[in-house]
Image (cartoon, helix red, strand yellow):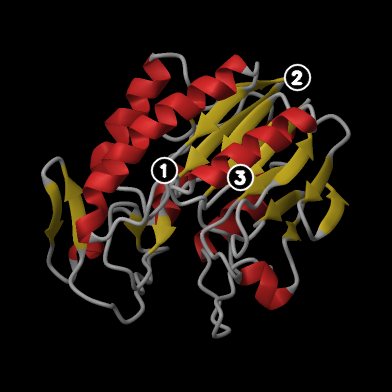
Amino acid sequence: MRVLYTVDLHGDPESYEISLRVARERRAAAIVNGGDLLPHAHRNAFAGQRAFLEWLRGYFGRVRDAGLGCFAMFGNDDARALVGALDDLERDGLCRRLDGRGWLPLGGGWSAVGFCWVPDPPFRLKDWCRHDDAERRSPPQFGTPLVSTPAGLVERPADWVAGLPTIEEELAALPAPADPGRALFVMHAPPTGLGLDVTGDGRNVGSRAARRFLEACGWPLALHGHIHESPHVTGRWFGRLGRTTCVNPGAMERPTWVLIDLEARTLEHRELGTTTF
């Protein structure tokens, strides 16, 4: 049972097509995309995200026609107001939405669940942003917060995120998998402290709550993304938290991918080597 993991493709058609080709060549049974599916969501690009979802309809159809499963979720740069279009693709049998509906079967007794929320970054789009834990810290912001609506992006007060549940609270609300020993957790943001969350200027911006959560639950594999440059800054694309192996393949060169063999329990990064979990 092989799965090809991709993340942070940001609406690049060539990256999607290469990912499908690699999945077929490496005999993967499914493609799992860990978020930031769509083009960047600046104010003048909202219509572009909507249009790209129509392109994804055709692409997901090609994935299905190739005999592969398709699992996907939004990331912090994907407008939440458009998530209904992802639901439409799921209803039409073209993909499975990872987040929000509990654990999905992958095969071989394995199941997967997605988690879109990220610790509040300086970027303006706040659709999938939360304070990490009870400390409720945010970095200096680049501008007034924005959230998506069906009509486009609208401004919110500077302290808007403060009134929402924390990532720690959202993680605590996740259902338990049927088999914790065959659980694949897809969280767009990486945990902090493993070298998977380091920005180009050396800051650690991952989730403290995720680190504590994964140390406690011990699921074998957690897949991340979000901080594109981290593996290139630290030289690390995986790390261990107790029984859990955490992965951030990076996204400085697209498409990034990791080939996962769920039975052999191996991970192969496109460029940075192999490991076990």
Q: CA–CA distance between discs 1 and 3?
A: 12 Å
Q: CA–CA distance between discs 2 and 1?
A: 26 Å
List the residue tagged with mark 1.
74
Side (left or right) of 53 relative to 151: right
In the depicted structure, whether residue 46 falls above or below residue 18: below
Q: Are marks 2 and 1 in contact (CB under 8 Å)?
A: no
Q: Quadrant of residue 250?
A: bottom right
List the residue tagged with mark 3.
6
Residue that extends furthest to the bottom in the rendered view of this protein: 201
The residue that appears at 38% across and 15% down in the rendered structure is 91
* Amino acid type at mark 3: Thr
The first of marks 3 and 2 along the sequence is 3
Q: Are marks 1 and 3 in contact (CB under 8 Å)?
A: no
Q: Secondary structure at mark 1?
A: loop
Q: Secondary structure at mark 2?
A: loop
Q: Secondary structure at mark 3?
A: strand
Residue sitting nearer the eye, 230 or 110? 230
List the residue tagged with mark 2.
108
* Amino acid type at mark 2: Gly
